[in-house]
Amino acid sequence: MKTMTCRQLGGPCDLAHRGETHDDVINAQDQHLKQAEKEGDEAHLPARKEMKGRWRHPKKSLGWYRQMQADFAALPED
Ligand SMILES: [Zn+2]
């Protein structure tokens, strides 16, 4: 398991997500951003918008995914 924070995934806080793969932490971040939006957390809105845009334009967002994958791979195991 590895840990990536909201901030490492483009968000504004230091909440930690743990997962076996970069997909796990990206999905956890997606849920976290959805929850923040529901709660009216304005600090997370720009990150939420970016994440929404990535689902809509997966090809354009490939660079971001590759970066997250590389960042995740470079992290030490917990
Ligand atoms: Zn956050």
Image (cartoon, grey):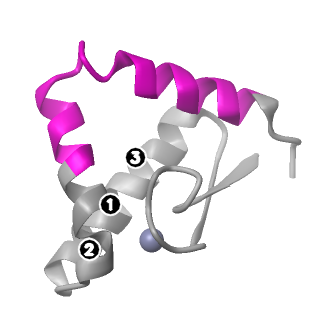
At 51% from the left and 42% from the top, the residue drawn is: 24
On the rendered structure, is 36 left or right of 24?
left
Q: Magenta region's main secondary structure?
A: helix
Magenta-drawn stretch contains 62: yes
Q: Kindly indicate whether the residue at mark 2 contacts the one at mark 1 (C-beta within 8 angstroms).
A: yes
Q: Is residue 14 above or below residue 56?
A: below
Q: Residues within 10 Å of mark 1 (few under 14, many from 20)?
A: few
Query: The residue tagged with tag 3: helix, strand or loop?
Result: helix
* Residue 69 figure quarter: top right
Query: The residue tagged with tag 1: helix, strand or loop?
Result: helix
The kind of residue tagged 3 is Asn
Q: Distance between the residues labelled 3 and 2?
A: 12 Å
At 45% from the left and 44% from the top, the residue drawn is: 26
Magenta-drawn stretch contains 64: yes
Could you say which disc has been placed on residue 35 in the image?
2
Q: Kindly indicate whether the residue at mark 3 contacts the one at mark 1 (C-beta within 8 angstroms).
A: yes
The kind of residue tagged 2 is Gln
At 20% from the left and 87% from the top, the residue drawn is: 39
The kind of residue tagged 1 is Gln
Furthest toward the top, the residue is 59
At 52% from the left and 62% from the top, the residue drawn is: 6
Query: The residue tagged with tag 2: helix, strand or loop?
Result: helix
* Location of ligand 1 given as a quarter of the image: bottom left
N-term-proximal mark, 3 vs 2:
3
Q: How crowded is mark 3: few (under 14 residues within 10 Å), some or many (20 or more)?
A: few
Could you tell me how many numbered marks the image carries? Answer: 3
Picture coordinates of residue 45, whole percent (x, y): 22, 68
Residue at numbered disc 1? 31
Identify the magenta region.
50-73
Furthest toward the left, the residue is 56
Q: How far apart are marks 1 and 3 (CA)?
A: 6 Å
Residue at numbered disc 3? 27
